[in-house]
Amino acid sequence: RMRSLSKLGLPAAATTLATAGTGLPADAITVTQAKAAQTRLNKLGCAAGPVDGKIGTMTKAATVRFQSANRLTQNGSPTRTTYSRLMASTAKRCDVRAVPARSGSGRRIVISQSQNWVWLIDARGKVVRQGGIIDNPRYLRAGTYTSGAKCGRSARIRRNTDGGSLYLNNFVRFAPCGIGFHQIPTYKSNGRQIHADYLLGTNYKASHGCIRVSASMSASIWSFAAKSVRVVVVRWSAP
């Protein structure tokens, strides 16, 4: 958790952030810089949330998405290195990314496990939708799959269940036997998601093998996979 150190003999605008319980990091940024970083992250489509100078979970998740899109170490820490790249005119957006090389051609869905990102690509090679995911590379190997029924199980299930307290809405199967896309799981009791959308595109959560996406992305994938579609999973990919 981050806290503000207000007794460093510095002006209030230059108060420096540090991790609670530790000394001052060598590459810490100031509160003013943190606000500038949040503003810049939001402008680049990284969804940092309120510009308040506090490096909370939402800002850290946005930082991970920026680091992922700009080939930096994904640690969620707005260090001076990340800050410098963020403020550069060459900084890449978080929400619009190039399709990974060597992911094939034609109509397909591409998953990058290193970027925690997914692309829906039409027959002409145009990206029709892209966005962040939560996955678990331990259960899904890189390779090419095809959406559809597997192991005698349905290809698509509008309201799937985990067999317990959760719904896996808009479930689209593409790998044996139970791996598919679905909305972030929701509680049967109240309909709430088990975690926020802003964690998508990061490694802060891990699924049980499936690909978690936002509700709107799950609806897009549901429609896109009405007919069987190739799903290309790449482990490492440069943005």
Image (cartoon, rainbow, N blue to C red):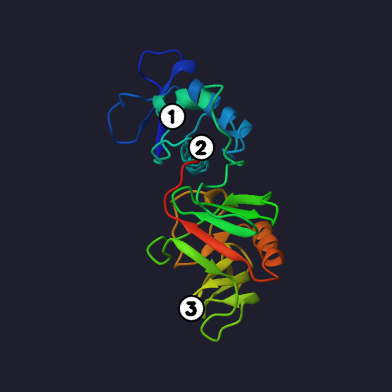
Q: Is residue 207 left or right of residue 52?
A: left
Q: Nearer the viewer, residue 16 or 134?
A: 134
Q: Quadrant of the N terminus?
A: top left
- The three-letter code of the residue at mark 3 reads Cys
User: Residue 181 placed where, x, y %?
Assistant: 57, 66
**Quadrant in the picture for residue 29:** top left
Q: Nearer the viewer, residue 83 or 102?
A: 102
Q: Is residue 23 left or right of residue 86?
A: left
Whichever of labels 3 and 2 marks the residue nearer the N terminus, that label is 2
Whichever of labels 1 and 2 marks the residue nearer the N terminus, that label is 2
Tag 3, which secondary structure? Answer: loop
Name the residue: 64% across, 67% down: 191
Q: Are marks 1 and 2 in contact (CB under 8 Å)?
A: yes
User: Residue 215 placed where, x, y %?
Assistant: 65, 60
Q: Is residue 223 left or right of residue 140?
A: right
Q: Nearer the viewer, mark 3 or mark 2?
A: 3
- The three-letter code of the residue at mark 1 reads Thr
Name the residue: 49% across, 22% down: 33
Mark 3 = which residue? 177
**Quadrant in the picture for residue 188:** bottom right
Q: Nearer the viewer, residue 190 or 130?
A: 130
Q: CA distance from mark 1 to mark 2?
A: 9 Å
Mark 2 = which residue? 66
Mark 1 = which residue? 82
Tag 2, which secondary structure? Answer: helix
- The three-letter code of the residue at mark 2 reads Phe
